Every structure is written in structure tokens, then in C-alpha cells.
Image (cartoon, rainbow, N blue to C red):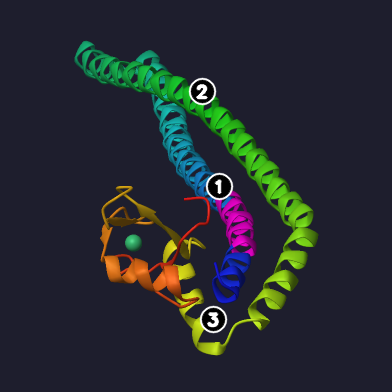
């Protein structure tokens, strides 16, 4: 392998390490983002449960007011019952009283239902509050892990970036541009080895994409220190001395 391809391989070695670190950091960043969404969902569920509880409590309060009014009427009808003069009046007041009492008992059982509902909703709300706390705690942990990873990688990353600059300096602008373009496409896997498929026949493969390679392309690489890219995947080809 000539000097040009050696320089490119040296640059790729640094590039792959940079890509790997960035990939790990990005994965942690994504975990944080997913957890942010979980916290938001838990908070939204909490808010809607709280609103539902508030509405049920309001219904209960309204019912309570009505119950008090009805109970007062029952009491006043009982008083009337003692003051009526005729049997006819008595029967009329009694019937009214019975109707009111029936209403009161219907409202009381409704109040009991609402009270049970409020209790159940309070319990569910308290549980949801716990969920929010747990998810928030998980988010804090993931954020810490992300920050720790950033810190622990920072020095290594700086060193690598410096090394990349040094390695890039050995290449001309056009070559470097090609390198960066392929690197972006294949996450740092810029170089691909040319494999000889058959020991006697002139058959070659690009190891990057496993597609066959025209023999003249391989021959150029065997004779010159030149930039040859794979027609199929676009990676920069090299022939390893070991193969
Ligand atoms: Zn290829």
C-alpha cells in the first residue's frame, strides 16, 4: 500500500473511533429524549386525573347542597304534618313528605356512589403521582449518565479530533472532501478492502458491499498508489498486503 492509501487508512482509524464515541453519546441522548416523553405522558395523565377528581368533587358538593335543602324541606313538612286540621290536608302533606323522603334517599345513595368514586380517584391520583416521581427520577439518572459519558469522553474526543486534524493535513482538499463524504454516508467506514475471490482467476470483490469489482480497478491498485472507489458503494478501495 502506498503513502496516500496509508494516510487514508490512518485517518479512517481515527475517524472510526470518533464515530463510535459520537454514536454512544447519541444513544444516551436518545434515551434521555425518550424518557422526557415518558415524563410528559405521565404528567399529562396526572393532570387529567386530577381534573376528573376535581369535577367529581364538585358534583359531590352540589349534591350536598341539594341534600341539605331537601332535608330542610322534610323537616318543615314534618312540622306541617303536626299542624294540619283535616284528614285531607294530612294525606296531602304526608304524600308530599313521602315523595321528599324518597328523593332524599335517592340522593343519599347517589352521594354515597360519588363519595366512593372520589375515594377511588384520589387513590389512583396518588398512584399516578408516584409514577410521575419515578419517571422523573429515571430521567434525572439518564441525564446524569449522559453528562458523565460526555465528561469521560471529552478528553479522548479532543485527542482524536486533534489526531484527525493531523491526519487530514497529509491529504489534499479533494481527497479529504471525498473521504468526508463517504464517511458521512457509511459512519466512518470509508475504506474497503479488495478481496481476490479466486487464487488463479482475476476475480475481485469489494469487501464493503460484497459486489464484484472490475479486474482493471484492482490492477490499478496493485500497481499505483491511487484513489480508486468502488463503483457500487463508493468506498475507497485498498488491497491489503496480507490478502
Ligand atoms: Zn463496494
Residue shown at the point (46%, 38%) measured from the top left: 49
Residue topped by disc 3: 176
Residue topped by disc 1: 31
Residue 229 seen in the figure: no
10 Å crowding of disc 3: few (<14), some (14-19), many (20+): some
Q: Position of residue 210 (x, y in %)?
A: 31, 53
Residue span colored magenta: 13-29
Residue 99's label in the rendered image is: none
**Is residue 154 positioned above or below 168 on the image?**
above
- Secondary structure mainly formed by the magenta segment: helix
Mark 2 or mark 1, whichever is nearer to me: 1
Q: CA distance from mark 3 to mark 2?
A: 69 Å
**Is residue 63 positioned above or below 171 on the image?**
above
Which residue extends farthest front?
Answer: 200
Cβ of mark 2 under 8 Å from ligand 1: the answer is no
| Nearer the observer, 39 or 212 | 212
Q: Are marks 3 and 2 in contact (CB under 8 Å)?
A: no
Q: CA distance from mark 1 to mark 3?
A: 33 Å
**Is residue 161 positioned above or below 94 on the image?**
below
Q: Is residue 19 magenta?
A: yes
Which quadrant of the figure shows ligand 1?
bottom left
Amino acid at each position: 500500500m502506498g503513502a496516500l492509501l496509508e494516510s487514508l487508512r490512518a485517518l479512517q482509524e481515527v475517524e472510526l473511533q470518533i464515530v463510535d464515541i459520537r454514536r454512544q453519546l447519541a444513544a444516551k441522548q436518545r434515551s434521555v429524549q425518550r424518557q422526557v416523553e415518558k415524563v410528559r405522558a405521565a404528567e399529562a395523565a396526572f393532570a387529567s386525573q386530577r381534573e376528573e377528581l376535581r369535577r367529581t368533587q364538585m358534583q359531590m358538593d352540589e349534591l350536598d347542597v341539594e341534600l341539605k335543602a331537601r332535608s330542610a324541606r322534610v323537616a318543615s313538612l314534618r312540622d306541617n304534618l303536626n299542624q294540619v286540621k283535616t284528614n285531607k290536608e294530612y294525606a296531602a302533606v304526608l304524600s308530599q313528605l313521602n315523595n321528599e323522603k324518597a328523593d332524599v334517599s335517592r340522593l343519599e345513595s347517589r352521594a354515597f356512589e360519588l363519595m366512593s368514586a372520589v375515594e377511588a380517584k384520589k387513590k389512583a391520583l396518588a398512584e399516578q403521582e408516584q409514577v410521575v416521581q419515578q419517571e422523573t427520577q429515571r430521567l434525572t439518572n439518564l441525564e446524569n449518565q449522559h453528562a458523565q459519558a460526555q465528561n469521560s469522553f471529552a478528553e479522548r474526543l479532543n485527542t482524536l479530533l486533534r489526531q484527525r486534524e493531523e491526519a487530514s493535513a497529509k491529504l489534499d482538499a479533494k481527497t479529504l472532501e471525498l473521504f468526508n463524504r463517504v464517511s458521512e454516508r457509511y459512519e466512518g467506514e470509508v475504506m474497503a478492502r479488495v478481496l481476490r475471490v479466486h487464487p488463479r482467476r482475476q476475480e475481485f470483490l469489494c469487501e464493503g458491499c460484497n459486489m464484484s469489482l472490475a479486474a482493471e480497478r484492482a490492477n490499478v491498485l496493485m500497481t499505483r498508489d491511487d484513489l480508486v472507489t468502488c463503483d457500487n458503494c463508493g468506498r475507497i478501495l485498498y488491497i491489503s498486503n496480507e490478502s
